[in-house]
């Protein structure tokens, strides 16, 4: 029997991943998440109107700590940085990102 006729099987084992939940300042327009040791950009985007940001990063980054930055595009306020932020691990199959 050909493989393409068999039903697909999805891997339901837990896949742990780091979850960043950021309650950003209302004056912030953008945010960035960087790996602390190499300053590699892991995630960046606009801060939604409500200021609530959720994003996922690889578990190894979550455990070693990341840099979280928020920016004001009008340059009225200085950028704010949180260093060494460790993120909780969640199962990627069950996490709710709200969209």
Image (cartoon, rainbow, N blue to C red):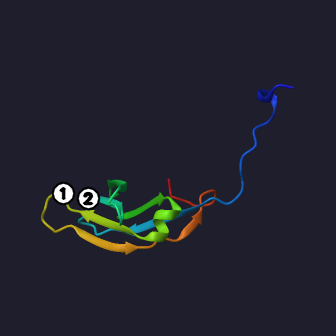
Q: Can you tell which quarter of the image residue 3 is in?
A: top right
- Depth check: 94 or 42 in front? 42
Q: Earlier in the sequence, mark 1 or mark 2?
A: 2
- Depth check: 60 or 68 in front? 60
Q: Residue furthest toward the right?
A: 1
- Residue at 27% x, 70% y is 81
Expressed as whole percent of the image width and height from the top left, the position of residue 44 reads 34, 54
- Tell me the residue that label 2 is attached to: 29
> On the picture, is 66 further left or further right than 30?
right
Q: Is residue 49 visible?
A: no
Quick one: label 2, few (<14), some, or many (20+) residues within 10 Å?
Answer: some
Q: Can you tell which quarter of the image residue 76 is in?
A: bottom left
Residue at disc 1, secondary structure? loop
Q: CA distance from mark 1 to mark 2?
A: 6 Å
Q: Can you tell which quarter of the image residue 20 is in?
A: bottom left
Q: Which mark is residue 73?
A: 1
- Contact? badges 1 and 2 (CB < 8 Å): yes
Image label count:
2
On-image quarter of the N terminus: top right
Q: Residue furthest toward the top?
A: 2
- Depth check: 77 or 1 in front? 1
- Residue at 72% x, 54% y is 12
Expressed as whole percent of the image width and height from the top left, the position of residue 70 reads 27, 64
Q: Looking at the image, is 96 positioned above or below residue 65?
A: above
Q: Residue furthest toward the left?
A: 76
Q: Is residue 16 visible?
A: yes
Residue at disc 2, secondary structure? loop
């Amino acid at each position: 029997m050909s493989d393409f006729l068999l039903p697909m099987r999805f891997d339901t084992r837990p896949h742990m991943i780091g979850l960043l939940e950021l309650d950003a300042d209302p004056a912030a327009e953008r945010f960035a998440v960087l790996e602390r040791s190499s300053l590699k950009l892991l995630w960046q985007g606009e801060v939604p109107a409500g200021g609530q940001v959720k994003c996922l990063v690889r578990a190894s980054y979550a455990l070693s700590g990341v840099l979280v930055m928020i920016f004001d595009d009008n340059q009225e306020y200085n950028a704010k940085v949180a260093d060494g932020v460790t993120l909780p691990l969640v199962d990627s199959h069950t996490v709710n990102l709200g969209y």
